[in-house]
Amino acid sequence: QVQLVESGGGLVQPGGSLRLSCQVSGNIFNIYYMGWYRQAPGKQRELVANIISGYSTNYADSVKGRFTISKDNANKTTALQMNNLKPEDTAVYYCNVQVWILRTGPGDYWGQGIQVTVSN
């Protein structure tokens, strides 16, 4: 019913930039939560940034001032702009949404994950 497609990852040198995108499709009445998470090798999954209905945003301390989350309601898309990337940003990044599905009810969905590697 609901599908998330992530794009924009890859390999970048320290100090470079990448923009991740997550497009949501399906019979969705409302998206009330969008977030980006990441999991680095040997570490637990952690919240990177999220945006909640009313456009309230939250960021991990490690990315404040470097990353920006945004939301496009018309296209049902969230993006994560990542600037001044550091090697410690290397991880698999996951998009997460909480939605209200038409004729069904609430749902929680995850993207497939996309690799971001920051290395010289």
Image (tube, rainbow, N blue to C red):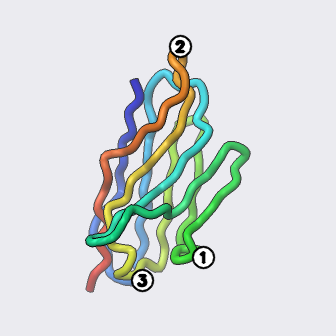
Q: Is residue 28 left or right of residue 90?
A: right
Cβ atoms at labels 3 and 2 below 8 Å apart: no
Q: Amino acid at mark 3?
A: Gly
Q: Which mark is residue 103?
A: 2
- The answer to whether residue 20 is above or below residue 14 is above
Q: Amino acid at mark 1?
A: Gly
Percent x, y for residue 15?
42, 83
Percent x, y for residue 55?
69, 50
Q: What residue is drawn where x is 51% and y is 17%? A: 104
- The answer to whether residue 30 is above or below residue 120 is above
Front tag of 1 and 2: 2
Crowding at mark 3 (Cα within 10 Å: few <14, some 14-19, many 20+): few
Secondary structure under the numbered disc 2 in the rendered image = loop
Q: Which mark is residue 15?
A: 3
Q: Is residue 51 left or right of residue 13?
A: right
* Residue at mark 1: 65
